[in-house]
Image: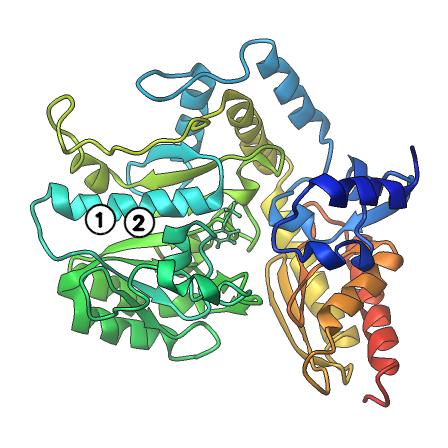
Amino acid sequence: MVDARSWGERDAAVVWHGFTQMASYLDNEPIIVEAGEGHEVIDVEGRRYLDAISSLWVTTLGHRVPELDQAVRDQIDRIAHSTLLGNGNRTVIELAEALAAVVPVDRPHFLFASDGAAAVEQALKIAFQYWVNRGVTGRSGYLTLGHAYHGDTVGSLSLGAGGFGTDLFDPLRFGASAPAAGSAVVRAPGYDDPDALAVAVRLVDEHGARLAAVVLEPLVQGAAGMLVADPGAYGPLVEACRRHDVLLICDEVATGFGRTGTLFASEQCGLRPDLMAIGKGLTGGYLPMSATVAADRVYQAFLGPDLSERTFYHGHSFSGNALAAAVALRHLQLVDERQVLANVRARAATLARLAAERLAPLGAVADVRLCGLMGGVELAPPADGLRWGRRVCAAAVRRGVLLRPLGDVVVLMPPLTVTDDEVERIVDTLAAAVVEVAGSEGPMG
Ligand SMILES: *Cc1c(COP(=O)(O)O)cnc(C)c1O
C-alpha cells in the first residue's frame, strides 16, 4: 500500500482532523507522512517536503535528531511513564531543575501537562485560587488582549479573542456574555493596535481590584497572524500590575524555546511573569508535554495542611510523562550545545532581507511580519472568499515546501536549525506560489 490516495481515503474514513472540514479534506490534497529526516517530512510515496511550519510550530531542531532519538531509547529502557500525582520521577526532577535555571520566573515550580491549552488552563485556575487561598475576594477577572489565542479548551478559549470559527462557542466562554459579572474577561486591543499596551494599562487601573491576572502572549501574537509588539513597551503594564497587585501570566507556548531569538520572548520584553505557560517546542516537537511555571510567591500561597483546601486540586494523567521529560531535558542541552539561538538570529536576518526583497514588493502581498523565525506573510486578495491563503500554500506544497495558512496569512515557521539555503528556498517557493495564484486572478502589481 504505497498510494497516497488510498492512504488518504483510509485516513478520512477513521481520523477526524482538528480545524479541518472533513467533507473536503481529501480535495485539499493532504500529504500523508510516513517518515521524516532533518528538516523534511517524507510522504507515503517517498516525496519530500521542507517542513516550513515545523509541524505546526513544535519542531525545533528538525525530525529524527540522533541525540533526541537516543534520549527516548535510553528512557524507554528505564520507564515510559509513572504518575506525578503524589509521587515523583527522577527524569522529571532533572528536567525541572534544568528548566528552573533558564525560565524568566522567580524561583520557579513546574506543573506539567500535555498540551499548551492545558498549561494555560492550569495557569488561569492557579491565578484564581491564588486569591482565594490568600483570602482575597472578588478577584476572578482576567485582562487579555484582542486577537489573543491561548488554546481550545473552554477556559483557554475564554481568554482568547475568538475567531477561527470558534465564535459559536461564545455561550460556553466565561465572561463573554456577562462582562459586568465577576468572572469577566476584560479585553484590551491586540498588537495590531500600537496603543494596545497603553490601553491595557488603563484597563488594569480601572478594573485592577477585580482582576486575578493579566494574560498575554509576550512579543508576538502567533495565531493572530504574527502580530509583533514593541518589546520596550511592556514596562508600564508591569508597573500597573504591581500597583494593583494583579498577577501576570505569560503564554510562551508559541514563543518559547528560541523561536524569537531568545530562549523566551519574555526576556526581550523585560517580563518576569508570575505564571508562564510553555508547550510546543518544549520537547523539540517530539512528544506532547507542556507546563505551567509558577513563581515561588504564587506557589507559597498553596501550601497548608495535608488535604486542606489550599491544595491545587487539578492534575492530568500524563503530567510529567517520563519519555517526554527525557527528550525535553536532552533538547534543552542541545539548544545550548548547538548554539541554536545564534542560528535563529542569523537566519532571521536572512529571512527578513529576502522577504523584503522578494515577497514584500509583490502586489499580492499586503504585509510581511517577522520576529525571529516566526513569520506571517499577509496576502491581499482582491475580493473575499478566494481562499488565497489555502491556494498559495497548496502551490508551495506542490513545489516541495510544506506551508499552512492562517486565513490569508501564510505562516513561516521553519525549524530553528534552518540554513540560509533553506530560508531562500522557502522565500522563493512562496514567491512563486503567490505569483501563480495571484496571476491567475488577473493583473497584479
Ligand atoms: C498553540 C498555542 C496554544 C495551545 O497549545 P496546544 O498545545 O495546541 O493546546 C496556546 N497558546 C499559544 C500562544 C499557542 O500558540
Q: Nearer the viewer, residue 67 or 124?
A: 124
Which residue is at a point 46% across and 54% down the rendered structure image?
265
**Percent x, y of residue 315:** 35, 31
Is residue 317 visible to us here? Answer: yes
Q: Residue at x 71, y 63 (%)?
A: 351
Q: Are circles 1 and 2 on residues that touch, CB within 8 Å?
A: yes
In the orientation shown, which residue stands out farthest toward the left?
135
Which residue is the site of mark 1?
Answer: 128
| Residue 378 sits above or below residue 269 on the image | below
Disc 2, SS: helix
The CB of the residue at mark 2 lies under 8 Å from ligand 1: no
Residue 436 rendering spot, x and y as whole percentages: 88, 74
Q: Is residue 368 found left or right of 263 in the rendered image?
A: right
Position in image of residue 292 (x %, y %):
37, 40
Residue 11 lies in quadrant: top right
Badge count: 2
Query: Which corner quadrant of the image does residue 247 belong to?
Result: bottom left
Question: The disc labelled 2 sits on which kind of residue?
Answer: Leu
Residue 356 higher or lower than 124, as above or below: below
- Residue 380's quadrant in the figure? bottom right
Assign a secondary structure to mark 1: helix
Would you call the spot at circle 1 few (<14 residues within 10 Å), some (14-19), or many (20 or more)? Answer: many
Q: Position of residue 314 (x, y in %)?
A: 30, 34
